[in-house]
Amino acid sequence: MIASLTAGAALIVCALVELLFPGKDLYHYGWFNVLLAALIVVAVYPLARTLRALSTPRERAGFTAGIAGAVIAGFATIASGLLGPDTQVLVAAPGATERVDALGGSLVFPIAAANGASQSGVQLVRGGRALAVTARRYDGPFLLVALPRPVVSVDVSDLRGGHLTITQPTGNAFLSPVLLMQAQQVIAGMTVPYDSFAVPAEHRVVKAVLFSAEQAERMPSLGAATAAVLFDVENENEVEVKNGIAVAPDGHRVTLAGIQLLPRVFEYPAVEVISVPDIRVVGFALVLVIAGAILTRLPQTV
Amino acid sequence: MNRQIRWLLILAVLAIAAVIIVPFFRSDTSHATGPSALAGSAAPVFALLDDRGASVSLQQYRGHIVLMNLWASWCPPCRAEMPDLQRLSQQYTSAGLVVVGVNEGESPERARAFAQSLGIRFPIWIDDQQRYGRLYAALGMPTTVVIGRDGNVVKGFDGALTLTQMQDAVRPYLKT
């Protein structure tokens, strides 16, 4: 009985730990899941003998319910570890809709204004219903986490101030003026994100490197005390143009190579999708365990 | 009785196993991308300015069939397509079609000069934040979307269309 109870308790603890501290590589390791399977065997194997040793039907029912709950939680934990996909971070442009098969629906990313203000957060749309993806949202066998990350909105105009189209031929959204800054490079020992876009009307291709406020402070040559964007302008044939490199602090316009560039740095959510033990199943398992504990503790006659 | 309980237990175990395992085997069916993927969904509505500075919105055309074309003056296929859009507009206005050209990211002056140079008389809207380009998942320019009388997207196209393709796209929804 002690072995059963210990193994059952360990299974419940593992399920809760995976729910509270999700996304660890350990949960997907084969040996870890074999260990969980071994705990299930240890919990179930002596069940018949233990039930015979218990004196009342109520105790037997309670013990069975408790072990059943632990085993169900164990199977849910193994399923998420072995069958669940690895953690993925979905990054999308404001206004984009990304189909996510694992969730059986689509993530709708909100439109953000030029100053970065968005009217709502990311929503999971499934079967005609929209669910807000808040800081942490459990959704069956997945945990969705909204992760704010820095992006750069760029406003480009010609020398007379006429607005110009930005395209991202290699980016997530062809016509988005928001750069998602997913690539990284090392400059002066600092890892900085960068992205690129085209200004077709002026036959320009622009690389934008983002320095956070802390990084800008460590590089006095940037001349910025806030977050700043280093622009490197080339022509369409990837040839450097004269006076084509400049730094623009967040919210400050810079003129180079015949165009004016105004960057605005703001945070925009990405969504991390983490496989976890199905919260509905673990909840049901916990109910069984609690019910089992109550049954075994109740006096025989009430 | 014991046999019944055993079967009930087996069924319960199978049901729980299904609840645990089935979500991981959702089909990875391929899905359309780009503007065509939006067919059936509500067309986003927000206020824009037209090339004369007047406030406009798709809401004003509810009850009409709207063919919305996303374009820019630097885009050669957009330029090539414009005269056919003008012909389509003239041909089907009386049947309830509204053609709207939405300039993506340029100034009203540039858009107006471009439209005038081609003799365009359908409405030209200015989307300087390129919001429609993002919302319609444009893969390139031009992008064309047909919106039904109920405000839902019925068709989306990536790339330039011929006049025949435009007619085929709107004719089924127009009053004959």
Image (tube, rainbow, N blue to C red):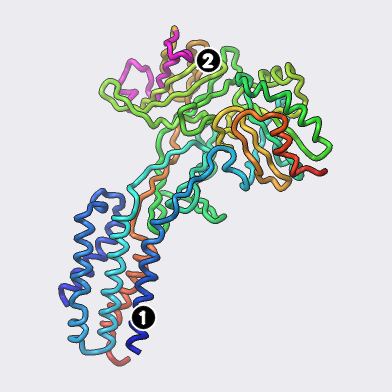
- Which residue in the protein does label 2 denote? A203
Q: Amino acid at mark 2?
A: His
Which residue lies at the image location 54% right of the left edge and 29% below the top edge? Answer: A175
Does the rendering let one see residue A16?
A: no
Other-residue count near label 2 (Cα within 10 Å), few / some / many at <14 / 14–19 / ≥20: few
Above or below A54: residue B11: above
Is A167 a magenta residue? no
- The residue at which mark 1 appears reads as B7
**Residue at 30%, 77% in the rendered image:** A65
Residue B7 located left or right of residue B58: left
Q: Percent from the top left, x then y, of residue A258?
A: 52, 11
Which image quadrant is residue B149 in?
Answer: top right
Q: Residue at x 48, y 46 (%)?
A: B30
What is the spatial separation of the Cα atoms under label 2 and label 1, in whole angstroms? 73 Å
Above or below: residue B170 compared with residue A207: below
**Which element is circle 2 on?**
loop
The N terminus of chain B: image quadrant: bottom left
